[in-house]
Image: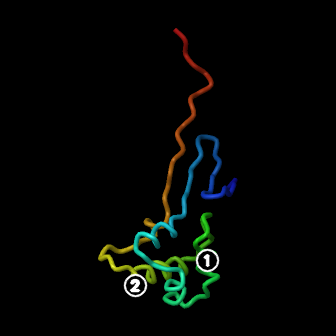
Amino acid sequence: MKIATCSRVVAKSSVAQTLIRWRLNEVMARHDIRAKQLAEEMEVSPTTVSNLRKRNMPRLTEETLDKLCKALNSLSREGIPITPGDLIEYIPEPEKPSSKQNYE
């Protein structure tokens, strides 16, 4: 079961929670890429880029993710390639202490 929060997606499991954070805004800021530039490079509307920039992890097709990375790399002035791994951050939630404690 997945629950969307304001800035991340929380996947519930019986063991622990995993947090996935969408980092497009951070990548764009780091590489000084404007939304209008990205929309033009991807050949999409500014509304599409706005939807991609929202804090929640968007639903992406392989094609859209590929197009996004190609456009970001084309607009970036740095020589370091931007990959899907730069756009998605995995933050494991710390495990909660067991309710059963051994007292000796």
- Left or right: 41, with 11 as reference point: left
Label 1: which secondary element: helix
- Left or right: 83, with 68 as reference point: left
Query: Badge 2, how many Cα within 10 Å: few under 14, some, many 20+?
Result: some
Query: Badge 1, how many Cα within 10 Å: few under 14, some, many 20+?
Result: few
Colour convention: rainbow
The total number of labels drawn is 2
Q: Which residue is depicted at the point 59% across and 46% down?
A: 17
User: What's the distance in space between the residues labelled 1 and 2, CA to CA?
Assistant: 19 Å
The x, y position of residue 36, in whole percent, is: 54, 85
Amino acid tagged 1: Ser
The x, y position of residue 90, in whole percent, is: 50, 55
**Disc 2 designates what residue?**
74
The x, y position of residue 80, in whole percent, is: 32, 73
**Disc 1 designates what residue?**
50
20 shown above or below 29? above
Label 2: which secondary element: helix
5 shown above or below 31? above
Q: Which residue is depicted at the point 49% across and 80% down?
A: 34
Amino acid tagged 2: Ser
- Determine which of the numbered discs, if any, sits on residue 25 in the image: none
Q: Which residue is depicted at the point 69% across and 54% down?
A: 3
The foreground one among 101 and 82 is 82
The foreground one among 78 and 20 is 78
Residue lying farthest to the top in this orientation: 104
- Left or right: 26, with 1 as reference point: left
